[in-house]
Amino acid sequence: MTLRNSFLALTCVLGVTACSSTPTHYYTLIAPATPTPASVGQTPFQFEMQAVLMAVQVDQPPLVIRQGNGSLAILENERWGAPLGDEFHDALTGQLERRFGSRDLAGLPKQRDQPVLSVRTDVRRFESVLDQYALIDVVWNLSLRGIGAEPGTRRQTLTCSSVIRQPASIGMENLVIAHQKAVSTLADTIARTATQWARQPDARCPS
């Protein structure tokens, strides 16, 4: 009986060990719903969000962490809920929709009596330093086509860039929250610039 009990105990230990491997955590850049931020005013255009270009070093399912010696650590058990480029696209789109007070109409019919603003982003750097900061370096392009203009016609364009560094508290979740805040700050900048530029074509990028 003692031998049998010992065998059962060993079996239980092995079973627990097999089931106690490091769990996989999934994160998103889409911030939780909060009260609508201050509006930039009635936007004089319809809005469409284009695909996002993402830095190749980080454009993969696992989170990529920059280390102090200049190396990168790929965390296989810490993952984005979707490809990082898609996460960034959806997070920024939602933030801009709230600020513009209108939906993203990419791929949908547009009204012919209103200009159409296209927003394109190229994320040159998406830097994550655990327990320290999150940083994004983004080149963004605004393209405005006039009332009744068909796709492919000549457009007015403005290209700007933003480098946003957001402090991060201790832990992976706080690092992700810092990235969410950085995306929100970028949305603020794009929304203000786009609205001013649409009304005053000689407006320039924020300094």
Image (cartoon, rainbow, N blue to C red):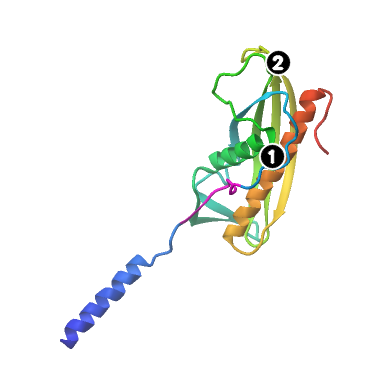
Residue at figure coordinates x 26%, y 78% from the top left? 10
For marks 2 and 1, give the CA distance. 23 Å
Is residue 126 at least partly visible in the picture? yes
Residue 186 location (% of width, % of height): 70, 41
Left or right position of 36 against 108: right
Residue at figure coordinates x 58%, y 59% from the top left? 172
Left or right position of 155 against 196: left
Residue 136 location (% of width, % of height): 68, 46
| Residue bearing the label numbered 1 | 187
Q: Secondary structure at mark 2?
A: loop
Does the CB distance between marks 2 and 1 fall below 8 Å?
Answer: no
The three-letter amino acid code for the residue at tag 1 is Ala
Residue that lies at the very extreme toward the front in this rendered image: 35
Q: Quadrant of the C terminus?
A: top right
Q: Is residue 197 magenta?
A: no
Residue at figure coordinates x 70%, y 43% from the top left? 37
Secondary structure mostly seen in the magenta stretch: loop
- Stretch in magenta: 25-33
Left or right position of 119 against 3: right
Q: Is residue 55 above or below residue 171?
A: above
* Quadrant assignment, res 46: top right
